[in-house]
Amino acid sequence: MKRRDFLKGIGLIAAGAAVAPKALAGTFSPEQKALTEPFNPELKEPGSLNSLDLGIRGLRPNVNKQITMVIVGAGNRGSVYARYAELYPDAVKVVGVSDINPARKANVAEKHSIPQNCQFGDYRELLAAGKIADAMVIALPDDLHYDSCMKALELGYDVLLEKPCAQTEKQCRDILAQTHRYKKIVAVCHVLRYAPYFIALREIVRRGYIGNPVSFQHLEPIQYAHMAHSYVRGNWRNSKETTPIILAKSCHDLDFLRWIIDKPCKSIAADGSLHLFKSDNAPEGAPKRCTDGCPVEAKCPYSAIDIYANKRRHLHVFDLPKGYTREDIIEKLRTSAYGRCVYYCDNDQPDHYVAAMLFEDDVTASFSMEAFTPKGRRRTRIMGTTGMIDGDGAQFTVWDFRSGEKQVWNRKVSEIPEYKGAGHGGGDHALMRDFVEAVAWQDPNRLTSTIDVSIESHIMGFAAEKSRKYQRKVKIKI
Ligand SMILES: NC(=O)c1ccc[n+]([C@@H]2O[C@H](COP(=O)([O-])OP(=O)(O)OC[C@H]3O[C@@H](n4cnc5c(N)ncnc54)[C@H](O)[C@@H]3O)[C@@H](O)[C@H]2O)c1
């Protein structure tokens, strides 16, 4: 007799969690019931993992009308979301823009034919004009999210809010309360929840391929040059002006863990520090800028000349003119924050960070954020009662202990034509698709990252930082 039939026979499945032994029932939601039983190969759908319908959709939104939106902060992220409207103009139109950088504002305004009276500098000018669209995309620096989002909700906008939502736990809770007060939709840009790879990984776990998941290991390799660019020289270098790196960089990862485990986090213990990028570690004779004749420039992996002028990484921050030359880049390094020696910056963000988490039902997770890594994707290993999954951010392998069978999910996102070139493994534009649908149908359930659910991983982030700072395990209360 199959285990499921046996359990049905003795009434455990029908009777539910109240009478089932803890090891079998736990507190699983109905759709998670499969996780309470060892994986049965007979239940597996035929065909390879790649052929399964795991809920990955194309990027065209299914809407009943065109929605309008304003882009607030037309930098890197704002442009990504505005681009979606170029691809699906019948579903979404950008009707306004705000940015204090005239070139960025003009760029979005030109692409979307935005009239002069709907082009604004500071976001407060836009808010003073009242409500001019259905939705607002807030892609401002971290310290401006709170004020802009609170006022946008008051004006009646639905909001796509970049992460981190705000700089403190209280501010995040205020945004949640304001969302409810004005009955609006706030989607937090936790783009991993929308990326096909992560959707597939989560779905395989939910379908019970490794039985009951017990423990998770997750690695976020920041990459040495990205660390130097964003968290040593650049916009997120100072935790007080922005947010601690566990939120600024890793709230995606805490959110991914909360989402895939699908149970509340009970406690967190974190550690980590700024090991390398401080003046004590400056090489002898190093000047304040890489362009000032540094004796170790030719060997230093963090050389601004190498990262920007040789390897041409992260150049969007310079707003270079069309047809720019190497000398144009070098000039930016002589004058901007990005030319500074990494040992002489005003930075305080840790370059390595670990966190151990306990979730409901004794599920554990460990997380590592590492600056000292080459370019690479996030890695996840999931240990279950009947199997294990090992994923590298593009593909994952599923082991079944009893059969010894090993299967691989390695569907290429680029095989879905609309996903080609979409950032974060397709997550950026899939998030936009769901946001546009949610606004058009006024249905927040079309999103998986509303503020209501995203707030939990933010609270985990604030708790992690408290734990790291005060060197103690922190209990989490949602
Ligand atoms: N979801 C993700 O994966 C992801 C990735 C990177 C960044 N982010 C977040 O997105 C947000 C924006 O990051 P970014 O990389 O696009 O930064 P960015 O610097 O490229 O863009 C921010 C823009 O805001 C503009 N701005 C600043 N002050 C303003 C004001 N008072 N009024 C109007 N405009 C103003 C700037 O001129 C700039 O163009 C940040 O909160 C960041 O943490 C999210």
Image (cartoon, rainbow, N blue to C red):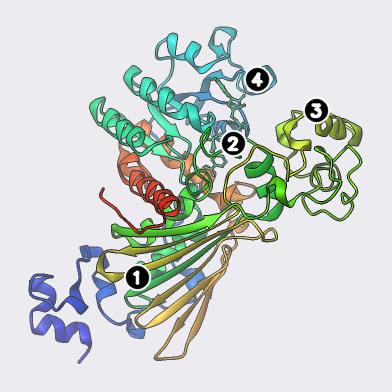
**Vertical placement of residue 147 versus 252, above or below:** above
Residue kind at label 3, given as amino acid type = Thr
Tag 2: residue type? Val
Quadrant containing ligand 1: top right
Q: Position of residue 299 (x, y in %)?
A: 86, 56
As measured in the structure, the alpha-carbon distance from the residue carrying label 1 to the one carrying label 3 is 54 Å
Question: Badge 2: how crowded within 10 Å, few (<14), some, or many (20+)?
Answer: some
Q: How many marks?
A: 4
Residue at label 1? Answer: 207
In three-dimensional space, the C-alpha distance between marks 3 and 2, rounded to whole angstroms, equals: 27 Å
Mark linked to residue 101: 4
- Tell me the number on the disc at residue 335: 3
Q: What residue is rendered at 47% in x and 87% in y?
A: 405
In-image side of 256 versus 310 (left or right): left
Measured in 3D between alpha carbons, the distance from the residue under mark 3 to the one under mark 4, in whole angstroms, is 18 Å
Q: Which percent across, then down, holds residue 33?
A: 23, 70
